[in-house]
Image: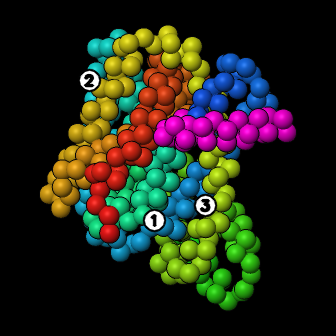
Amino acid sequence: MLLSIALILLSGLLLGSLFHKMKLPSLLGMIIVGIVLSPHALNLIDESILNISADLRQIALVIILTRAGLSLNLTDLKKVGRPAVLMCFVPATIEIAGTILLAPLLLDVTYLEAAIMGSVIAAVSPAVIVPRMIRLIDEGYGTDHGIPQLILAGASVDDVFVIVIFTALTSFASTGTISAGSFLQIPVSIVLGSLLGVITGILLVKFFQKFHMRDSVKLLIILSISFLFLELQNHFGDIVPVSGLLAIMSLGILLKQNYNILAQRLSAKYNKLWVAAEVFLFVLVGATVDLHYAVSAGISAILLVMGVLLFRMLGVMLSLIKTDLNRKERFFCMLAYLPKATVQAAIGALPLSMGLACGQVVLTVAVLSILITAPLGAICIDHLYQKLLETN
């Protein structure tokens, strides 16, 4: 295991740095490292790490979502208003609809299988988007119109929405029945997750103000509570649907609003944690990619992935109707909402493991969506934000 950890960190940092110097996203280099080290290539990652790779990716997501919460100003988010709500579900819904239209034509699947495929590839990647939006907030780009805040909030809820849709559709494909209660879980999990984060945040602020301790200890406490949020979601989600990811972000936002000095110090510490977490996240995402599936997919699957991106961009455009954003800012929002990676790596193989007939083709399209959209979206954000957005 130690050898694998060393290979992941050293190779990921090296290739990530090389790609950064070539003006390309470092995550692309890290994903390539994961593909090369994976069981599908050189097989240099210890099986014990692969067995817990989903948990390691979750830890990285906890770190990046907490960073997002600690950077989000609630006042700025309130100014965004209606578009932030629409961005949570409209782009994903339209992308799923686009998949239902295109997939049967391109890949010879049923409409239900196309809907399952759409629910897998529709989720946007917080791991790609969040660090870039935090950088925009720090540099002051697009903050007058709350653009980074809009994308941060939308990307976080988007995942909750899509995963619930995916669960309902795969359940229907397996059992032939679907309940209205499945879809009721979406608003319930969003509201309960937000409330859980806010209430916990209020209690933590009072606790930290009363008992003095090192910031490192406070960070460990917040990390542990964040892990408990995810366990609550995983083990009791069927009884009480609650979004652990939204609870984590809400906790960070509450700390930012009520204890800003501490939030700034904690944010700096989370930034340091992200250096290692980012490497593990994207290398392990790359390790899930089997290039054999991508190669066997052919041009039809690539056309599908590119085609549904146009539907997603249409969804973003509709969400931004009647806003003060100019054309350049709207175009930036469309580009920033393209990347997919973490959710696809987490659920892409589930239909295959469930024995669904569409499992293989869903996994193939999920792999392609990571390979195409993660670098494409990251490159667009990194190279165009200074040209498309205004700075303070």
Task: Count residues near mark 2 (Cα–Cα under 10 Å), then give few for <14, some for 14-19, many for 20+.
Answer: some
Looking at the image, is mark 3 or mark 2 nearer the viewer?
A: 3
In whole angstroms, how far apart are the C-alphas of marks 1 and 2?
40 Å
Q: Amino acid at mark 2?
A: Leu
Instruction: From the top left corner, tell me how far across and down residue 366 is, in percent.
Output: 48, 27
* Amino acid type shown at disc 3: Asn
Q: Main secondary structure of the magenta part?
A: helix
Residue 138 shows which numbered tag? 1
For the residue pair 334 and 172, the one nearer the viewer reads as: 334
Q: Earlier in the sequence, mark 3 or mark 2?
A: 2
Residue 185 percent across, percent down from the top left: 43, 50
- Amino acid bearing label 1: Asp
Q: Spatial distance from mark 3 to mark 2, Cα to Cα?
A: 42 Å
User: Compared to 277, does 360 lie above or below?
Assistant: above
Return the mark for residue 334: none
Q: Residue at (38%, 30%) from the top-left corner?
A: 118
The residue indicated by pointer 3 is 271
User: What SS does tag 2 mark?
Assistant: helix
Q: Is residue 55 magenta?
A: no
Q: Is residue 137 left or right of residue 49?
A: left
Residue 181 in picture, x, y percent from top left: 40, 46
Q: Is residue 346 visible?
A: no
Q: Which residues are magenta?
A: 1-28
Please name which of the two marks, 1 or 2, marks the residue nearer to the observer: 1
Q: Which residue is mark 2?
A: 101
Rendered location of residue 172, percent (x, y): 43, 29
Q: Pick out the residue farthest to the right.
A: 2
Q: Do the numbered discs 3 and 2 sit on residues whose CB atoms are within 8 Å?
A: no
**Quadrant housing the C terminus:** bottom left
Q: Is residue 7 magenta?
A: yes
Q: What quarter of the picture does the N terminus occupy?
A: top right
